[in-house]
Image: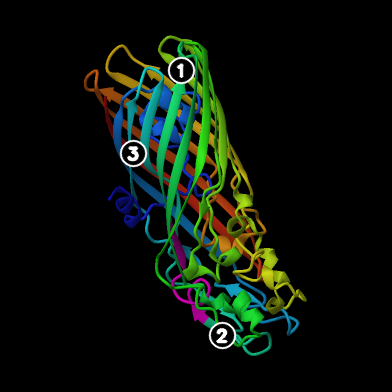
Amino acid sequence: MAIAAMLFTGIATATNGYLTHGVGTKNKSMAGAGTALPQDAIDVANNPAGAAVIGTHREVSFSLFSPMRDYTSSASALNGASPDGMTPVFTIGPNSLSSKNELFFVPSFAMSWELSEQNSLVLALYGRGGMNTQWKGGTASFEPGGPGTGVVQAPGTYGAGTAGIDLSQAFFNLTFGRSTVDETFSWGVSAIAAVQKFKAQGVASFAGFTETFASSNGAQQPVNLSDNGSEWSFGGGVAGGVLWQPVPQFSLGARYTSKMYMSKFDKYADLFAESGGFDVPANASIGIAYKPVERLTLAFDVEQIWYSDIDSVGNPVQNLFSCPTTGQGGMELSSCLGGNNGGGFGWDDMTIFKLGVQYETNGPWTWRAGISHGKQPIGSDQMTFNILAPGVMETHLTAGFTHKQSDTSEWNLSFMYAPEKKVSGPNNFDPTQTIELKMQQFELEISYGWK
């Protein structure tokens, strides 16, 4: 029921690429810095070793996430017409559009048990990634019959009606943690089941660039490219972490989460590389936490996300130019959409730096703030397809608090603002025009925890 609630409400968490800036209300209010500072059961998502030190705990959270996305495309000197009668041209607009769907509801839940003085078990359910765009309106100009057959102007960003994608990801995490007798060192391992939901619309105009079309010499139209509704994907992976606290004032933590190997999106086998492959990228973090005075804690993390290892995400759009039907002289069917080396979004890996601060008052209040920054993954030469997935955020500013109702229960709140970021570059299929992607984000999360 919880997984269904998360996925059917439509998770969109495009912050660091399409992964969240943190997991858990306290962690989010410190910009995700917390690999060495586990505080709640949900923190096993940030470091499985935290399972051994948090005790018996429960929490449920509800987040309202608001991404505001826009794109503009400039005027073109080609307007969809091939300059040499051989090279296909695809002109977008000129358009200036804002994506629909600017508010998403994201719940999470976690509970932990102390099996013994040294052993603990945690069950957690959360959304870690997602992306949603819906571009209504606009036009595109191209030659559907091939170069020299006549330019057609059609409605929609890609000339196939309303364009966009909807990707949701939910994770079911079961973690075992163990600490040493003196509790200075702990470790944890997680078995993670992952569920994805995806749909794409408005990209049928790229049918001629698919492996299905190219391998049949145009005799077969792809049916698993666009507008096939939602499809589910299932899979999983593992995570491991360690936590070392030689003295109460200092702790060091490290965590690695493997790639999540997922079943393929068969309804979109002509869109994604490897016939619909869409695994979840591996990611890792290392962090420290330090208390210069009794009530003040500083936390610093470095996180790495390996987007480039996921072919459907990391393959550059330029791979398509080796497809026989793109008019660039290429003869590699595997480089067409849906092929093993098919063109994708061209995302780079991300390295994110996170700094958080926490101050505990004499009373029931604990205050938090944080900032994180990482270079966004979209290169200026990867603009055309990333209209669908404009994950351009780099900086996150966060704040939040905890209010203890009693020794066994508390309310937590976090707020995140990601300032507007713009990325621009040439249209890959019409270099005479420029495409600009723009986004800013807000998130408000409330959670209730009890022992």
Circle 1 SS class: strand
Q: CA distance from mark 1 to mark 3?
A: 22 Å
Reading the image, the residue beneath label 2 is 152
In magenta stretch: residue 243: no
> Can the viewer see residue 38 in this picture?
no
Q: In this orientation, which residue lies closer to the viewer: 338 or 412?
A: 338
Q: Please give the count of numbered marks on the rendered protein.
A: 3
Q: CA distance from mark 3 to mark 2?
A: 47 Å
**At 31% from the left edge and 38% from the top edge, which residue is drawn?**
61
Q: Residue furthest bottom?
A: 149
Q: Is residue 298 left or right of residue 427?
A: left
Q: In this orientation, which residue lies closer to the viewer: 237 or 335?
A: 237
| Residue 201 placement: quadrant | bottom left
| Crowd class of label 3 (few under 14; some 14 to 19; many from 20; radius 10 Å) | many
Residue type of the residue flagged with mark 2: Val
Tag of residue 297 = 1
Residue type of the residue flagged with mark 1: Thr
**At 58% from the left edge and 56% from the top edge, which residue is drawn?**
313
Instruction: Please name the colour scheme applied to the rendered image.
Output: rainbow
From the top left corner, tell me how far across and down residue 392 is, in percent: 55, 50
Q: Are marks 3 and 2 in contact (CB under 8 Å)?
A: no
**At 46% from the left edge and 65% from the top edge, which residue is drawn?**
164
Q: Are marks 1 and 3 in contact (CB under 8 Å)?
A: no
Reading the image, the residue beneath label 3 is 445
